[in-house]
């Protein structure tokens, strides 16, 4: 007898068909009926909670469908009826907000398109997001709708679901960030709020060496912080009804959990009208997730989805996927019950999560009671990060790892994750004394005595009454008496801390308070963790990868001095390739790793073989040493992983020695970056390969002669398009009307600004070549550019608006005035608030523009990066070269053809591949590496040189004849030219000549 056939779930059986019907725009009633079915049958909305045709007498209008604070407005054709939506929906939203006491969401749709709205401050509408249902992807519409109505409970905390519900594209994020931005505008002038923002920015500057703290990022970080704290409350089943208790950690402190949540830079939102309500709304969003048993650090997926990828690249933030963190933890923590583990750059807490899970598993296998296991966790698995949001996330991740047994916690349970500078840049030695400097925006820094900060118990005792004594007139005397009663605190340290108290009390009197206990408790922890009795058996993590050239001048000086003192500095032409990660590795060994302990860091692939990392691989850091014992290599054959290839270096703190002969090399295509451990094991092949070696090169005569092009940034200020004439008389030939050219590659804040528009004198418009106009042996049409340069005798002057006006270029002067106003408002600032450099200085940075004038009649240009080098001869005598190009002026066309042939050859590329920086798709950056080859100066009497010049000229003729589809992307055009050269046998001929000239490759 056959069993009964189990019916398919409604969602599986009906949703695809209904979405297909919606996409066909079935009319007002058709949309209403089908959305009703989806809400009820797929999202579980109770029928009784849906109100249809809800008449509102006061505004004399009818809401089509109402669910809680969500207003649905159905249309037959949304595009045609958009005016009606914008006229009626604001009144409906205002009416519902009066009823429910919170912000309402409006969704208008005709089936083929749905748009979500909120009311703006002026009572109009602002669009939050839109979705066009596709019959091929019905679940995508369901996810979008679910995020809007937020009705489903018990959501799985998988990274993709968290991103959909709370990430950058979610309606929750867009609505909350828009509200936060408006709240911040009302709060920014208040002293305490301004202080917290200033301290936050100082932390980021300490972390990344440059000012990256925009208002938009501060608002994003506030959103992330509120989410993280509400998640902590959810994990611990703590009621989240009181926003102040939730954000301050008071609710957790009352149940004996310290260090998880505390008042910080971001609780300014509590003091803004409407701020507490926003916190409650976000708490309701996080309450929908099942967070008591998660398999991974899910919060980093949320962070990565919210912070712009370009911004994360600038900050060196490349978060480690869980499969790799779990593998590394298993490899290096041999004795999890005894090992003290520290991640000094813990980020969102991925390594802490897996170290804790390993500890808990070992404790269960040994039969430890939960309280003992939790005490071991509290004492043995620690984290530091200088990023204020990362620390909050790491604390919550730490909790998530042990959430299933938190009820058995011992007394005095503290989450050991601290906001602090692991590099200890704030440690200062002066006149025989040592102190830690804590920056105070707009005032003198706080100087905390090292002796006080090193004594953890005394430190906590001294700070226990710090905030409470600030309002008292006798506060300083009382605080000093408190410290003097503690025999562990030296008299000089007590006096020094009393002076700190007096400074903070002055700030308190100015209204700049509410933060100092948090700052002092956290920022000084690294000093305690570096004491010999607190050092770790295992230091593990992923330090920031920030190239030296991206650091601020002040931090560059620090890094150079610290690297030189530890035998890490290569200097010279390799200076810009030095990376903060190498110094971080050495300092972690020096400060936090006990003798015989193990360090394992995820590092750039370049750490394996680039000369800039030679000092690191040597292992002798002067004050400490380590011997490398193992390494993993993740080059471009592992995708997707990091934006650039990576490695793992493992070492022991003992005498330095040679690196191992081999590495474990990985290869394979992951289903996604956040693949599970089982998915990664299934697709990644591991082989034992020789340690990658970088060859040593001899410098060419041409290395010093090639120059980098000009930094024409912001590009939309200078790269322009002619505005098409609409009148009968057409354009002015003397001063044509132009408009800044926009691009999807424009960076913030410039991409958010309107491009300039206006007439500019024709002689100030010049062609410009850049990477996208350059093919092998061939140039495409250059871009038109406003170049405010005039010759003053033999000297080129880059003009600002004033100079342009004085020189008789009124149109150019007006154009530059507009651009300079935008630049002065949005460019990086000095401490006094003025721009770090003027626009004309930026345009002629290091003289890279003025040196191109007058343009030489014959130049060789090549692109700084690409899978293959692209080079060509430029002969127009007019064009400017942009900074992605290198150029040289030559007098001899034969020499130009000789150089271009070498640059375009695969033979030259192959010889420098080991030295190239490697991007996501392999080795990509050339810069001046090719001139590390012993390429001789052109000699027309040399038969090989002459043959190369002839081959270069022949290749240029062939390349010019290659047909290119109109509008073809330059990468496709480059491939077409290379294919033609290969087919004609010219590419192989040139390679053979180059190899003959250079001799056998070095091993």
Image: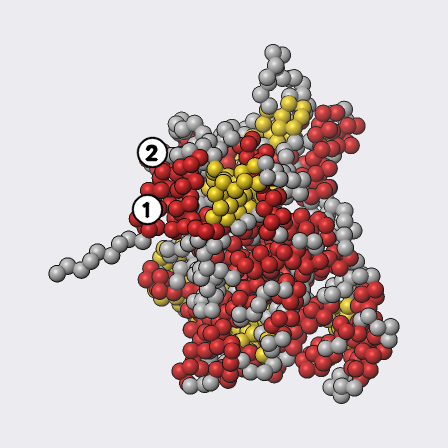
Q: Are marks 2 and 1 in contact (CB under 8 Å)?
A: no
Q: Which mark is residue 14?
A: 1
Q: Give residue 593's position: percent from left, percent from top.
A: 56, 76
- Badge count: 2
Residue at the spot of label 2? 984
- The answer to which of marks 2 and 1 sits earlier in the sequence is 1
Q: Is residue 269 left or right of residue 160?
A: right
Q: Nearer the viewer, residue 782 or 72?
A: 72
**The C terminus lies in which quarter of the figure?**
bottom left
The quadrant holding residue 161 is: bottom left
Q: Nearer the viewer, residue 806 or 906?
A: 806
Name the residue: 20% across, 58% down: 4
> Can see residue 919?
no
Name above or below for residue 708 compared with residue 894. below
Numbered disc 2: secondary structure = loop
Q: Label 1 crowding class (10 Å Cα cut-off): few <14, some 14-19, many 20+?
A: some
Q: Residue furthest left?
A: 1
Q: Which mark is residue 194?
A: none
Q: Is residue 558 left or right of residue 384?
A: right
Q: Nearer the viewer, residue 760 or 891?
A: 760
Q: Label 2 crowding class (10 Å Cα cut-off): few <14, some 14-19, many 20+?
A: few
> Can see residue 758?
yes
Q: Give residue 475's position: percent from left, percent from top.
A: 83, 75
Q: Nearer the viewer, residue 838 or 521?
A: 521
Name the residue: 33% across, 33% down: 984
Name the residue: 33% across, 59% down: 683
Name the residue: 70% across, 68% down: 519
């Amino acid at each position: 007898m056959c069993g009964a056939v189990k019916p398919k779930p409604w969602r599986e059986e009906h949703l695809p068909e209904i979405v297909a019907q919606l996409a066909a725009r079935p009319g007002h009633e058709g949309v209403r009926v089908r959305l009703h079915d989806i809400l009820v049958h797929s999202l579980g909305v109770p029928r009784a909670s849906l109100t249809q045709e809800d008449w509102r007498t006061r505004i004399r209008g009818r809401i089509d469908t109402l669910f809680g604070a969500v207003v649905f407005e159905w249309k037959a054709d949304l595009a045609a009826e958009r005016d009606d939506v914008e006229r009626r929906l604001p009144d409906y939203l205002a009416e519902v907000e009066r009823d429910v006491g919170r912000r309402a969401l409006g969704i208008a749709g005709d089936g083929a398109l749905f748009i979500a709205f909120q009311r703006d401050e002026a009572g109009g509408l602002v669009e939050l997001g839109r979705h066009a249902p596709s019959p091929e992807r019905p679940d995508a519409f369901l996810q979008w709708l679910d995020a809007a109505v937020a009705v489903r409970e018990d959501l799985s905390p998988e990274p993709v679901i968290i991103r959909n519900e709370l990430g950058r594209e979610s309606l929750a994020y867009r609505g909350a960030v828009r509200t936060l931005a408006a709240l911040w505008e009302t709060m920014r002038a208040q002293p305490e709020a301004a202080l917290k923002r200033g301290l936050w920015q100082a932390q980021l500057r300490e972390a990344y060496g440059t000012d990256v703290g925009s208002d938009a990022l501060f608002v994003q970080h506030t959103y992330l912080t509120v989410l993280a704290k509400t998640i902590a409350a959810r994990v611990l089943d703590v009621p989240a009804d009181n926003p102040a208790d939730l954000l301050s950690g008071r609710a957790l402190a009352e149940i004996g959990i310290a260090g998880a949540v505390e008042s910080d830079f971001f609780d300014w939102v509590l003091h803004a009208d409407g701020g507490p309500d926003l916190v409650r709304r976000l708490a309701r969003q996080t309450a929908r997730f099942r967070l008591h048993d998660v398999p991974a650090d899910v919060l980093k997926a949320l962070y990565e989805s919210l912070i712009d990828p370009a911004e994360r690249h600038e900050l060196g933030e490349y978060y480690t996927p869980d499969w790799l963190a779990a593998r590394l933890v298993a490899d290096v923590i041999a004795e999890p019950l005894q090992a003290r583990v520290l991640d000094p750059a813990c980020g969102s807490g991925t390594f802490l999560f897996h170290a804790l899970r390993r500890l808990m598993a070992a404790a269960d296998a040994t039969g430890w009671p939960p309280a003992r296991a939790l005490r071991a966790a509290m004492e043995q698995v620690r984290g530091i990060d200088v990023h204020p949001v990362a620390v909050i996330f790491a604390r919550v991740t730490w909790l998530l790892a042990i959430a299933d047994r938190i009820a058995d916690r011992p007394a005095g349970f503290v989450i050991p994750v601290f906001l602090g500078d692991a590099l200890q840049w704030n440690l200062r030695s002066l006149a025989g004394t040592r102190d830690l400097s804590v920056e105070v925006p707009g005032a003198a820094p706080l100087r905390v005595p090292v002796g006080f900060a090193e004594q953890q118990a005394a430190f906590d005792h001294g700070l226990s009454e710090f905030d409470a004594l600030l309002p008292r007139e006798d506060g300083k005397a009382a605080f000093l008496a408190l410290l003097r009663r503690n025999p562990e605190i030296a008299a000089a340290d007590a006096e020094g801390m009393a002076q700190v108290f007096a400074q903070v009390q002055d700030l308190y009197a100015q209204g700049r308070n509410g933060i100092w206990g948090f700052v002092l408790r956290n920022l000084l922890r690294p000093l305690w963790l570096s004491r010999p009795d607190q050092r770790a058996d295992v230091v593990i993590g992923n330090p920031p990868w920030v190239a030296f050239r991206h650091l601020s001048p002040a931090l560059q000086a620090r890094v150079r001095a610290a690297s030189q003192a530890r035998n890490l500095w290569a200097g010279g032409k390799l200076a810009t390739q030095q990376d903060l990660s190498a110094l971080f590795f050495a300092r972690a060994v020096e400060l936090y790793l006990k003798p015989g302990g193990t360090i394992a860091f995820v590092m750039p692939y370049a750490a394996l073989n680039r000369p800039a990392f030679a000092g690191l691989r040597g292992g002798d850091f002067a004050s400490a040493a380590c011997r490398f014992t193992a390494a993993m290599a993740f080059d471009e054959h592992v995708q997707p992983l990091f934006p650039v290839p990576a490695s793992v270096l493992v070492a022991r703190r003992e005498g330095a020695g040679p690196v191992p002969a081999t590495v474990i090399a990985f290869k394979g295509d992951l289903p996604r970056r956040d693949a599970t451990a089982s998915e990664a094991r299934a697709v990644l092949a591991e082989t034992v390969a020789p340690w990658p070696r970088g060859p040593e090169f001899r410098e060419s005569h041409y290395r010093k002669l090639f120059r980098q092009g000009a930094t024409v940034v912001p590009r939309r200020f200078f790269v322009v398009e002619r505005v098409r004439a609409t009148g009968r008389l057409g354009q002015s030939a003397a001063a044509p009307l132009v408009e800044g050219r926009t691009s999807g590659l424009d960076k913030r804040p410039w991409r958010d600004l309107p491009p300039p528009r206006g007439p500019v004198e024709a002689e100030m418009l010049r062609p410009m070549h850049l990477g996208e106009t350059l093919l092998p042996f061939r140039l495409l049409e250059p871009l038109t550019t406003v170049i405010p340069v005039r010759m003053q005798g033999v000297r080129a002057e880059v003009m600002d608006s004033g100079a342009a006006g004085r020189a008789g270029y009124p149109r150019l002067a007006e154009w530059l005035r507009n651009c300079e106003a935008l630049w002065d408002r949005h460019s990086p600032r000095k401490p006094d608030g003025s721009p770090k450099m003027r626009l004309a200085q930026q345009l002629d940075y290091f003289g890279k523009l003025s040196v191109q004038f007058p343009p030489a009649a014959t130049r060789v240009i090549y692109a700084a990066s690409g899978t293959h080098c692209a080079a060509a001869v430029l002969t127009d005598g007019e064009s400017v070269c942009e900074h992605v190009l290198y150029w040289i002026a030559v007098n001899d066309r034969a020499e130009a053809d000789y150089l271009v042939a070498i640059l375009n050859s695969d033979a030259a590329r192959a010889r420098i591949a080991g030295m190239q920086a490697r991007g996501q798709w392999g080795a990509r950056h050339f810069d001046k590496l090719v001139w590390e080859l012993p390429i001789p100066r052109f000699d027309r009497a040399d038969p090989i040189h002459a043959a190369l010049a002839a081959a270069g000229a022949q290749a240029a003729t062939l390349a010019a004849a290659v047909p290119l589809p109109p509008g073809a992307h330059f990468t496709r055009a480059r491939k077409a030219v290379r294919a033609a050269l290969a087919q004609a046998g010219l590419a192989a001929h040139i390679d053979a000549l180059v190899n003959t000239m250079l001799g056998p490759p070095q091993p």
